[in-house]
Image (tube, grey):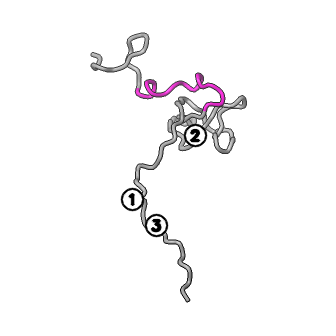
């Protein structure tokens, strides 16, 4: 029995959450900054903590340009988010040094 509201592929089979929100790495366009899920070849699948992009030479760290040492499996557009903390909640602010008084 299929749960109500579940998404299905063309064959009517339920899709995993990854397939709903992520695209297979083979579909990535060159030069687009992306979040990347990878496999290390030992059965572990995880999200890289930095943005990547696909180049003619393969997947690279978007900031450093270094080739990835792991195999990308899925990607989605990278969206930079800001801290949820309000400025007053970030901790004590250091006061600038005051001029010496005569």
Which of pointers 1 and 2 indicates the residue nearer the eye?
1
Q: Which residue is mark 2?
A: 51
Q: Nearer the viewer, residue 13 or 83?
A: 83
Residue 79, above or below 26: below
Q: Which residue is mark 1?
A: 89
Q: Residue at the location (49% across, 70% down)? A: 94
Mark 1: give few (<14), some (14-19) or many (20+) Cα within 10 Å: few
Q: Position of residue 3 (x, y in %)?
A: 28, 20
Q: Which residue is mark 3?
A: 93
The residue range painted magenta reads 17-32
Secondary structure at badge 3 equals loop
Q: Position of residue 62 (x, y in %)?
A: 64, 40
Q: Residue at the location (53% across, 29% down)? A: 74
Q: Position of residue 8 (x, y in %)?
A: 38, 16
Question: Most extreme residue toward the top, as rendered?
Answer: 11
**Whole-number angstrom distance, CA of label 1 to CA of label 2:** 27 Å
Residue 96, above or below 14: below
First of labels 1, 2 by sequence position: 2
């Amino acid at each position: 029995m299929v749960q109500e509201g579940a998404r299905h592929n063309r064959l009517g089979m339920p899709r995993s959450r990854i397939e709903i929100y992520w695209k297979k790495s083979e579909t990535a366009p060159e030069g687009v900054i992306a979040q990347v899920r990878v496999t290390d070849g030992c059965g572990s699948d995880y999200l890289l903590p930095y943005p990547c992009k696909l180049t003619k030479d393969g997947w690279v760290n978007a900031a450093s340009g270094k080739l990835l040492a792991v195999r990308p499996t899925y990607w989605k557009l990278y969206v930079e988010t800001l801290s949820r903390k309000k400025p007053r909640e970030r901790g004590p602010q250091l006061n600038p040094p005051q001029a010496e008084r005569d």
